[in-house]
Image (cartoon, grey):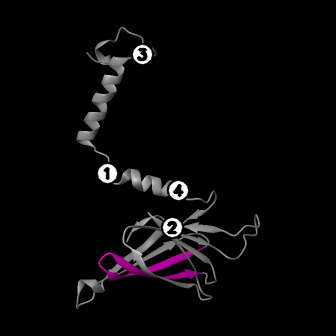
Amino acid sequence: MSALDRPDQEANGPIDDVDVATLGEIREMYDLVDPMPPGLVTRVQFALELEEAEFELARICEESRLVGVRSIAEETRTITFDSAVLTVMISLRPVTEDRVRVDGWLAPAGEHRVEFRLPDEKRQTVSDAQGRFVVDDVPRGRLQIVVRLSQQDHHNGSAPVVVTPAVEI
């Protein structure tokens, strides 16, 4: 007997064993017809671990792949992220089957702190005066880039922070 079979009982009463059983049946139904995507909990936890309280979220505005004619290992992927204060372009080139080299460019150019957030580690580098940065030997998987701009925001005196969405590399 489910709660739907007891219309005469008050709906606002305390949750009882019948309610718990009904909720379990609903959960089982959703698990069958619309299961949670694999890795969803891990992706949400990764997104929530960002330490910055205030940041500008960049969006992916372009993505392309270029495959070499000699081998699939020559595949290069380029992703461009854009925000109101910064454009980030990265080129991903396989080094091994499970590692990539990331070449990046920031516009406007400048010496900015660039952090790579990976599931198990963080790596930091600084872009050069032309906005270029390179990180070798990055493990494949989820990657999010955090850029701490060197110039100060005139509104509140702090350096702006730009965060890209997490992407699979």
| Figure label count | 4
The relative height of residue 27 versus residue 158 in the rendered view (above or below) is above
Residue identifier under label 1: 37
Classify the position of the C terminus by image quarter.
Answer: bottom left
Q: Residue at x 77, y 67 (%)?
A: 157
Residue 11, label in figure? 3
Can residue 117 be seen? no
Give the CA separation, mark 3 to mark 2: 45 Å
Q: Position of residue 99 (x, y in %)?
A: 36, 77
Local crowd at mark 3 within 10 Å, few (<14), some, or many (≥20)?
few
The amino acid type of the residue labelled 2 equals: Thr
Local crowd at mark 2 within 10 Å, few (<14), some, or many (≥20)?
many
> Going from the N terminus, do you reach mark 2 or mark 1 first?
1
Callouts 4 and 2 close, C-beta under 8 Å: no
In which quadrant of the rendered view does residue 100 lie?
A: bottom left
Task: Tell me if 30 is positioned left or right of 157 in this view.
Answer: left
**SS at mark 3?**
loop
Q: Which residues are magenta?
A: 86-107
Callouts 3 and 2 close, C-beta under 8 Å: no
Give the CA separation, mark 1 to mark 3: 33 Å
The amino acid type of the residue labelled 3 equals: Ala
Q: Position of residue 118 (x, y in %)?
A: 46, 67
Local crowd at mark 1 within 10 Å, few (<14), some, or many (≥20)?
few
